[in-house]
Amino acid sequence: MTRRDPPRDASRDLYRRPGAKHPPAAAPTPALERAVETITSLTNPAVKQLRALHLKKERAESRLFLAEGLKLVTDALDEGWPIRTLIHASRVKDQPLVARAVERARKAGARVLETSDEVLTKICRRDNPQMVVAAFEQRIGRLADLGRPEGVLVALEGVKDPGNLGTIVRTVDSVGAKGVILIGDTTDPFALEAVRATMGSLFHVPLFAASLDDFVAWKAETGVPVWGTHLKGAVDYRTVDWPETCVLMMGNEQSGLPEAHVATCDGLVKIPMAGRADSLNLAIATAVMLYEIRRARLAL
């Protein structure tokens, strides 16, 4: 059952949290009673709302973000992430995996929109868009609620590049580390570039946000050892007997760890450089460190 471009109804807006830019919605219609809507107009309010999620301000106000592609959408559904809206191209609606994602989204109470490629191009802001896109609720925890972890976490200070952040999240997932702590002013982990770079690992890796003071208090309470990478690090990272539980702290792309963050570390290490390059990309340096820290605990 389909219907075309219904008149705007605030109760069906994508934004349903108190304090969001748009009015909060009434209780959703039971999932199985909600029809799949067909949208063909580029000026439909839903298109505008979804397109706005490319902006950090809109993501912050709505607490939503976009995930592009059937794999990412399926990964998120598998992990139980709250889905608000699923959009798919009309020409793929009969593909079994797409139909399955649509049914799962409907059962979760999401709004499902069937659109043209042209509408998806506008929503995604690029040519040749993915044929399935969804808006999910953001999930990011408070460090105070984490307690003492078991395993390795990565703390990132001031990361500016969303591609680096997404790649680090993917690497954390690949080595079986336990989460990422974002300290201070970092790039938005729910920016589309970051989400794409995670390749779905965003939905498996817990994220936590904290100020430096929050991090210092948490470290004091839990006693978790913190190791940082630093150009002045006197210890070769390959010589450390890495504990089962620890935090690896990495600085931003340009200046590395500030002195205030260095002061929180129990040890500093350095990655030796043999060629003429004077630095490594942040995501690559983090991967080198994580694979060494986890080396004894990884098996083929």
Image (tube, helix red, strand yellow):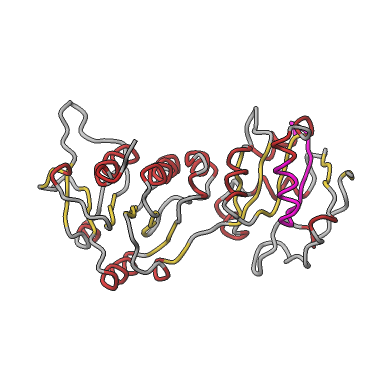
Picture coordinates of residue 219, whole percent (x, y): 28, 67
How many marks are shown on the rendered structure? 0
In the displayed structure, 167 sits above or below 21; it is: above
The residue furthest left is 234
Q: Quadrant of residue 183?
A: bottom left
Return the residue nearer the eye: 189 or 77: 77
Is 107 covered by the magenta stretch?
A: yes
Q: In which quarter of the image is the C terminus?
A: top left
Is 203 covered by the magenta stretch?
A: no
Picture coordinates of residue 109, whole percent (x, y): 74, 57
Return the residue nearer the eye: 29 or 54: 29
Residue at 68% in and 38% down: 132
Picture coordinates of residue 69, whole percent (x, y): 62, 37
In the displayed structure, 162 sits above or below 20; it is: above
Residue at 66% in and 65% down: 17
Q: What stretch is highlighted in magenta?
A: 100-118
Q: In which quarter of the image is the N terminus?
A: top right
Picture coordinates of residue 237, whole percent (x, y): 17, 44
Q: Quadrant of residue 276?
A: top left
Residue at 79% in and 43% down: 43
Residue 85 is left or right of residue 233, and the answer is: right
Residue 116 is left or right of residue 76, and the answer is: right
Residue at 75% in and 47% down: 103
Return the residue nearer the eye: 86 or 275: 86
